[in-house]
Image: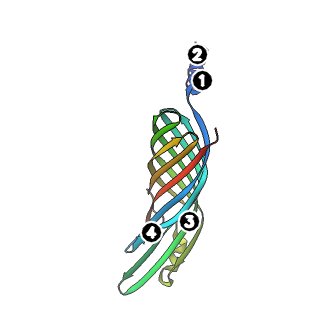
């Protein structure tokens, strides 16, 4: 009996996966990131992103991605008659796992999506004032956040606009969460 039940479950799973659409593609774009620093005014820093995405599903889909990004932030402050300013840039490996909903047809499709993102910092460069230069080593390598956004597919071309919010601090000592807006364009290979 267990063999028949297992065989039936395998056939049902194969039938569902055969009907589900699968696509793989490349993407690239720009982002505008900022990091909140304690007691400082923060400014956007323009960065990049480039990598791969997969999409599994039709109306409801799962979209894992893997891409490199350049993010960071600029800040300046004048507290207690002490002025400081700085800029931090990160090169990251990002892994968002998005769930989305599609609206439309095959050649013109609108989408909304959201999900968690894991970010690992591969490299960092800092230009900080002398009075805070010791804090440059206090940035966390691993961070978690979320992404939410919308996109459109026109044939094999895909475009997304997303907001990314940090759930963990970039630095436990003085920097808070990193947030960014990202605009990307991609091409579905198949």
Judge the density around disc 3: few (<14), some (14-19), many (≥20) Cα neighbours within 10 Å.
Answer: many
Task: Give the CA distance from mark 1 to mark 4.
Answer: 48 Å
Residue 24: x and y in percent read: 62, 41
User: Mark 3 or 2 closer to N-term?
Assistant: 2
The N terminus, quarter of image? top right
Q: Which residue is drawn at 39% across and 72% down?
A: 38
Where is mark 4, residue-wise? 175
Where is mark 1, residue-wise? 14
Image mark for residue 90: 3
Judge the density around disc 1: few (<14), some (14-19), many (≥20) Cα neighbours within 10 Å.
Answer: few
Label 2 near label 3: C-beta < 8 Å?
Answer: no
Badge 3 element: strand
Badge nearest the viewer, 3 or 2: 3
Residue 115: x and y in percent read: 46, 46
Judge the density around disc 4: few (<14), some (14-19), many (≥20) Cα neighbours within 10 Å.
Answer: some
In which quadrant of the rendered view does residue 80 lie?
bottom left
Q: Which of 148 and 142 is in front in this view?
A: 148
User: Mark 2 or 4 closer to N-term?
Assistant: 2
Q: Which of 47 and 174 is in front in this view?
A: 47
Residue 140 appears in the figure: no
Badge 2 element: helix
Where is mark 2, residue-wise? 2
Task: Give the CA distance from mark 1 to mark 3.
Answer: 42 Å
């Amino acid at each position: 009996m267990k063999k028949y039940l297992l065989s039936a479950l395998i056939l049902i799973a194969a039938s569902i996966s055969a009907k589900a659409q699968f696509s793989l593609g490349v993407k690239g774009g720009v982002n505008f990131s900022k990091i909140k620093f304690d007691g400082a005014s923060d400014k956007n820093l323009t960065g990049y992103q480039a990598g791969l995405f997969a999409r599994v599903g039709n109306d409801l889909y799962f979209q894992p991605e893997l891409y490199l990004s350049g993010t960071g932030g600029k800040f300046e402050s004048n507290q207690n008659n002490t002025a400081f300013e700085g800029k931090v840039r990160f090169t990251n490996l990002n892994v968002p796992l998005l769930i989305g909903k599609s609206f439309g047809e095959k050649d013109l499709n609108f989408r909304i999506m959201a999900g968690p993102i894991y970010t690992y910092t591969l490299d960092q460069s800092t230009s900080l004032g002398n009075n805070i230069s010791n804090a440059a080593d206090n940035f966390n390598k691993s961070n978690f956040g979320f992404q939410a956004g919308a996109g459109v597919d026109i044939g094999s071309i895909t475009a997304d606009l997303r907001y990314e919010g940090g759930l963990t601090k970039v630095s436990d000592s003085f920097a808070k969460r990193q947030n960014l807006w990202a605009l990307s364009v991609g091409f579905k290979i198949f």
